[in-house]
Amino acid sequence: MRRTIIGVLGLQGDFEKHAEMLHRLDGVVPLVVRTPEEVRSCEGLIIPGGESTTVGKLMVRYGVDEAIKDRAREGMPIFGTCTGMILLAREIEGSDQYRLGLMDITVRRNAFGRQIDSFETDLQIPAICNSRPVRAVFIRAPIVSEVRGNAEVLSRLPDGRIVMVRQGPHLAAAFHPELTDDTRIHQYFVDIVRGCASA
Ligand code: GLN
């Protein structure tokens, strides 16, 4: 099988867990990336959880923001989890912090409040599996408060709040799929990357 290079942005946050997850998938070569050159060598990129104002500032300081936007214009799929989702959004409620703005969504940071810092739940994600839900870990998580344009909802909490979206080749999840044993979400992203490569 042809090898697929998936970058994981390693400026801050839990990038190692994503790399470990990608290691488990057939034919995937994970690459922790921190420079524009490294970003350019990827076929797909994961932006992990962390602290979105910090990661945004570091992306600009290291010059990887422009490299990511260039690669996105060339069609490279990007998967943002938690902080990564915030950075992919065009609008961040009440904040002018740096963002890539590649998805037509509005996000609300820390949407579950201080009392519920983190929690786990089972999510229905029909695009991934109709029969077996995905266990999702939320940590100081954002939600998607508005979806516009070509962005489509992939999953909601039982109360209707949106926690996973797709727009073309880009994916965003409010939770941390790298913190369970379930590889299906990473596999779904790798399949998108391979679909783009062969298209
Ligand atoms: N609360 C963080 C932020 O706003 C995101 C938390 C996370 O990535 N787990 O950036």
Image (cartoon, grey):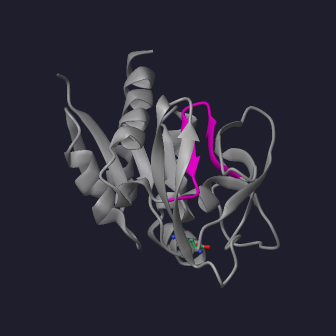
- Ligand 1 found in image quarter: bottom right
Observer-nearest of 34 and 13: 13
Horizontally, residue 178 falls left or right of residue 128, namely: left
Is residue 34 visible in the rendered image? The answer is no
Which residue occupies the foreground of this view, 20 or 68?
A: 20
The answer to if 13 sits in the magenta stretch is no
Q: Residue at x 52, y 33 (%)?
A: 74
For residue 32, what is the image quadrant?
Answer: bottom left
Q: Whole-percent x and y of residue 20? A: 23, 55
Where is residue 14? Give x, y as percent: 37, 68
Residue 68 in the image: state x and y as whole percent. Answer: 50, 50
Of 90 and 38, which appears nearest the observer? 90
Residue under the point 20% across and 24% down: 2
Viewport quadrant of the C terminus: top left
- Magenta stretch, main secondary structure, is strand
Q: Which stretch did the figure color magenta?
A: 162-175
Q: Disc count in the image?
A: 0
**Which quadrant would residue 112 be assigned to in this image?**
bottom right
Q: Is residue 169 magenta?
A: yes
For residue 12, which quarter of the picture? bottom left
Check the image and name the residue furthest to the top.
Answer: 199
Residue 119 placement (x, y as % from top left): 53, 69
Q: Is residue 24 left or right of residue 151?
A: left
Q: Residue at x 17, y 22 (%)?
A: 1
- Give the vertical position of 160 relative to 197 (above or below): below
Note whether residue 48 is visible.
yes
Tell me the residue at 47%/66% (across/down): 49
